[in-house]
Image (cartoon, grey):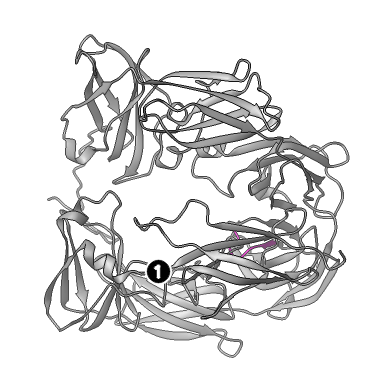
Amino acid sequence: MKGDYTVFAPANDLQLNVAVTGKPQITGTVLADDTNQPISRFQVRAIKLKTLRGANYGQEQGWQDVDQSGGEFKVAVNGPGIYRIEVAATGYARALSKAVNTDQIQGKPIQLKLTKGVTLTGTVVNTQGQPIDGANVIPLSLSRGVMSNTLDQFTTDSDAVKTVDGKFSIPHLAPGMESLKVTHPDYDFAIVKDIDLAASPTPKVEVTLTQGGTVQGLVTDENGKPQPNVTLFFQDRYGYNGDAARKAGLLATVITDEEGRYSVSHLPSQLCYVVRKDEWNSLGVVRQAVLPQNGKTSTLNLGGRPELTGRLKVNGQPLANTRILLAGENPNFGIFRAYTNTDSEGMFHFFGAGPGQRTLYYEVPDVNNDWVPVRSLELISDDQDLGTLEAQVGQLTVNCQPEAPDDMRLGLFNYHTVWTVSLGAGNLEPRTNSSAPFVFKQVTTRDYVLIASRSGYPSVYQKVHVTSENLNRQLTLPISEGTATVHFKLDQELMQAEEPLRLKLWSKDQRLLTNIYSFEAGEFVARHLPAGDYFLTRVDIRETKKLLQFTLRQNEQKTVTLTTELFKKSESKLGFRTIDVFTQAGVPLPGCHIQLESGSGTISRHIQQNERQSFVGDPGTYDLTVSYPGFQTLHGKVKLIPPDKSWIYPDNLTFNLRLKPEAD
């Protein structure tokens, strides 16, 4: 018996025959390009692009030494997936194979040919044009990681060269596009991209290093007292997938002195995320961010003034001796996080939480790091007493009609006015049997969406409005079962596309969704669809462009061919921009009121994610207005940028602004 099967407990007389095959292996040979003869001594490793099945285990970073007269190699990889093989040999440029699918090669060997490569030369100078001696210069091709998320990151400098009198020379680089990272302990690092090593003559590179910015400040505990010996990490993003990416993104490490103070120099002029060691188990401000300025000193305190006080009640009772959190719209991600505990009367204190928009959460009793949102708060730069905050929390009981199948999953999510995907909410109680209702606890007053999903069937969406009047609500969720089928087929051009095609098939009322994400041999079959009107789209947005619309009849078998031309006709080139607002010290100021105006009307915020506001509209220049309590209103111009002819947006669409305090 082959294929995928679902087994429901309890099950008797179940027998499974398990064949253990071990790790997949990729084999091949390495040849010299100029002689076509085998290279006997070299190093080889695998770079993982995608996991096909099973756990997404990381690939080992290290190299495997090979000494074979015929140039043969054999590399074991961590599970079924898509990989590239990298080969390095003395006197040759490193080479990368094309993508290798372990399901498709079936033991067939691959072949790599190594060239002598080219030599890249250049100089490193300071802003006065003076040569910098002893700078480390590392090409990306000699530093990248072995997972898809670190392919474009500098993960090591073990093969770096040092400048002598400001000059460097790096031999045996593969022709093609290259990037360089240049570091020196007395300067901010620099990255130079898009160096065309296939050009003739090979370009010479001049890199200018700047002083970078300095950030200093104070770290306190949850009571506002200075904390010595606290380790802070300065990182280039708020989260990482794996240790290799985390190491690559580390900008600096510092430990506070006996007075709780710290100072870090030579930081880049980019958003730096500052995180306390043991972030999840500490109290006080454990995460913040700052935008340094070259040649200037910024102040970033993790704690200290202002002081925020209040009292928290849940269903009329003080929330006593409970861990609470101030963060952004997501309690687990974002730029800011501060913890404290309530006392026996529900009173709490936070130090260094403002200014900015924060959300207050409390931890679910006896469940570590599971948070219930209480209220969004607009915090100012001065001390602030919130008074008594009342939270109303109940439970939502859901019965399915007809009765929920054993393999159906039901989730409760916050309803978002723009996006069809959002954060999970409530705590689902374990069901005692298959006919028992679904009960979600820790449900607050707001709008939600229930999503019932089942393999091979469309997901069922239903909006739920919870108020103080229906706090412990019961409802019936109709589960639709249909008989229509749609066969989606890709044309030849789409079948050869490098990026996988992901589509959404929605019913017209946006109650039923089939995610189309895996085309086998260019085909995807959507089954169990009720009769009605449907549309196809590419994005998780409620008011979205419809690629295709059609009607299904009961028992209908429909075939839809997807073409490149269909996508080009249905999409318009919208302008896009992310606007980040900071204080004069470069500390993020989330929750600002931002408006964009033009002759065709006003654009309000499209989405806020991880405390960053993004805007979508017709490309062009808009009048910009930014305001926040306690700061001067800023007026200016901003441009919404469209994608290029290949529908690709520029790498950095972030527009940074700094607001001045009203007192200035």
Graded by Cα atoms within 10 Å as few (under 14), some (14 to 19) or many (20 or more), the crowding at tag 1 reads some
Give the quadrant of residue 104: top left
Give the quadrant of residue 647: bottom left
Q: Of residues 220 and 653, which is closer to you in this image?
A: 653
Q: What's the magenta region? A: 325-331
Look at the image and tell me in which quarter the C terminus lies.
Answer: bottom right
**x, y percent for residue 69:** 22, 9
In this picture, residue 483 sits left or right of residue 499: left
Is 330 a magenta residue? yes
Please report the residue visible at 30 percent of the width from the left and 20 percent of the height from the top. 115
Taking 92 as reference, is 3 above or below it?
Answer: below
Taking 482 as reference, is 150 above or below it?
Answer: above
Please report the residue visible at 67 percent of the width from the left and 56 percent of the height from the top. 336
Q: Is residue 345 in sight in this rendering? A: no
Q: Which residue is mark 1?
A: 540
**x, y percent for residue 118:** 38, 21
Please report the residue visible at 48 percent of the width from the left and 51 percent of the height from the top. 651
Q: Is residue 118 in sight in this rendering? A: yes
**x, y percent for residue 215:** 76, 43
Q: Residue furthest top?
A: 69
**Three-letter amino acid code of the residue under disc 1:** Asp
SS assignment at label 1 = loop
Please report the residue visible at 29 percent of the width from the left and 54 percent of the height from the top. 500
Is 286 a magenta residue? no
